[in-house]
Image (cartoon, rainbow, N blue to C red):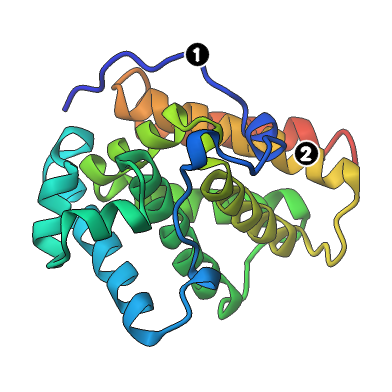
Amino acid sequence: MKLKQVPEQVPMAAKAKTSTQPKNGMSALSSDELGSAAQRDRRRRIIDATLALASKGGYDAVQMRAVAEKADVALGTLYRYFPSKIHLLVSGLAREFERAHEKLQRTSIPGDTPSERLIFVLSRNTRLMQRDPHLTEAMVRAFMFADTTAAAEVEQVGRLLESMFARAMGIEEPTEHDRAVFHLIADVWMANLVAWVTRRASAADVANRLELSVHLLLDNTR
């Protein structure tokens, strides 16, 4: 599996502060904007189809027409829900994190310190993503390519990560400092996922770098 050259990384902290007003009126319909059960089911089918295609062939396998056919929706309908494959895949990444967050809420997080518990959460999510390299390649690549037109989807990913990190660290009301730390950890994590899908880092490298980063950030600041 090869990943085309990834543009210079935009830190997640910067993405999260991007204006939510998309250019050219492009924005995906969020779950909150989908009023009927039929609309929500259609959105679910579209994301299911997107992730299934990505799981088989990575980023390049996700083509709008193929997604529409697999989800059994008209191409025009697909574009009304998701203006581009970037929106599709970043929304898919958000849903994967939603599911991870739901599982985490039902789990007792092991560890005697915030660092240990956060490392556990990061390691668990990393292993889950590494089980499906093609899908991870597609979602990470889309996230790195996302611009202001996908600001809402990117912010949703950031909020979910922030919530998981806060729970791991036992923080109910994160301060601005806490959020800054969350953003740095998210940036390091995303950068290492990029390194992994491009085969510039092994799974062990990613685990070691994440552990080192967490200890450097938390053990010296809290």
Q: Is residue 171 above or below residue 93?
A: below
| Amino acid, disc 1 | Glu
What x and y, as percent, mark residue 76?
23, 54
Viewed as shown, does residue 99 lie left or right of 80?
A: right
Q: Which residue lies furthest to the bottom in this view?
A: 37
Viewed as shown, does residue 219 lie left or right of 208?
A: right
User: Residue 154's image quarter?
Assistant: top right
Look at the image and tell me in which quarter the N terminus lies: top left
Q: Residue drawn at (80%, 45%), measured in percent from left and top?
A: 179
Please tell me the numbered disc located at residue 184.
none
Question: Dot 1 surroundings within 10 Å: few (below 14), some, or many (20 or more)?
Answer: few
Q: Nearer the viewer, residue 150 or 198?
A: 150
Which of labels 1 and 2 is toward the front?
Answer: 1
| Residue assigned mark 2 | 181
Q: Residue drawn at (40%, 23%), measured in percent from left and top?
A: 195
Viewed as shown, does residue 73 lie left or right of 17?
A: left
What x and y, as percent, mark residue 140?
39, 36
Q: Nearer the viewer, residue 84 or 163?
A: 84
Asked whether the viewer can see residue 205, the reply is: no
| Amino acid, disc 2 | Val
The residues tagged by marks 1 and 2 sit, at their Cα atoms, a distance apart of: 21 Å
What x and y, as percent, mark residue 108?
62, 75
| Residue assigned mark 1 | 8
**Under tag 2, what secondary structure?**
helix
**Under tag 1, what secondary structure?**
loop
What x and y, as percent, mark residue 143?
45, 36
Q: Nearer the viewer, residue 141 or 210?
A: 141
